[in-house]
Image: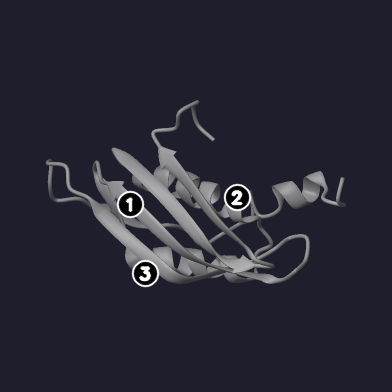
Amino acid sequence: MTGYTDDHARAGTDAALPALETWPSQYAEDYEIVISIPEFTSICPKTGLPDFATLTITYVPHRHCVELKSLKEYLLAYRNLGIFNENVVNRVLRDLVRAVEPRRMAVKGVFTARGGIQTTVGAEYPFAHGNP
């Protein structure tokens, strides 16, 4: 064990964040929306050091689309949030799926290398094993 605790592992997964707003999609046909966030930041809950990433959100709306200003405010709240990279991607996916109820969605985080190790995390909806 390297000093990581269950609290480190859970950090940020249930923190209060700004609400994600939506607006009604005007099309019944499937279409894809891709949102890129090249300046995402969060904090490592163990070291307190910043993590930097490019997040990419890809989804096919069902009835609603995410309102981009609310998405920006939501993502900016991670700037001071202690949360592991894996939890960032899964939390963003979970929160967006709850807000937008898409036909399908994927979130990918490409985190900047630290100490010579680069991490890429991806998660998709529908979930393979039920809700997260």
Left or right: where 79 falls relative to 127 = right
CA gap, disc 2 and disc 3: 22 Å
Q: Amino acid at mark 1?
A: Thr
Q: Check disc 1: other Cα within 10 Å, few if <14, some if 14-19, many if 20+.
A: some
Q: Could you tell me residue 65's position as x and y percent?
A: 28, 53
Labels 1 and 3: the sequence-earlier one = 1
CA gap, disc 2 and disc 1: 18 Å
Q: Quadrant of the N terminus?
A: top right
The residue sitting at 82% across, 50% down in the picture is 4
Picture disc at residue 58: 1
Q: Secondary structure under badge 1?
A: strand
Q: Amino acid at mark 3?
A: Lys
Q: Secondary structure under badge 3?
A: helix
Q: Quadrant of the C terminus?
A: top right
Picture disc at residue 87: 2
Labels 2 and 1: the sequence-earlier one = 1
Q: Amino acid at mark 2?
A: Asn
Picture disc at residue 112: none
Q: Could you tell me residue 103's position as x and y percent?
A: 28, 38
Labels 2 and 3: the sequence-earlier one = 3
Circle 3 residue: 69
For the view shown, which residue lies furthest in the front direction?
A: 116
Using the image, determine if residue 103 lies above or below residue 128.
below
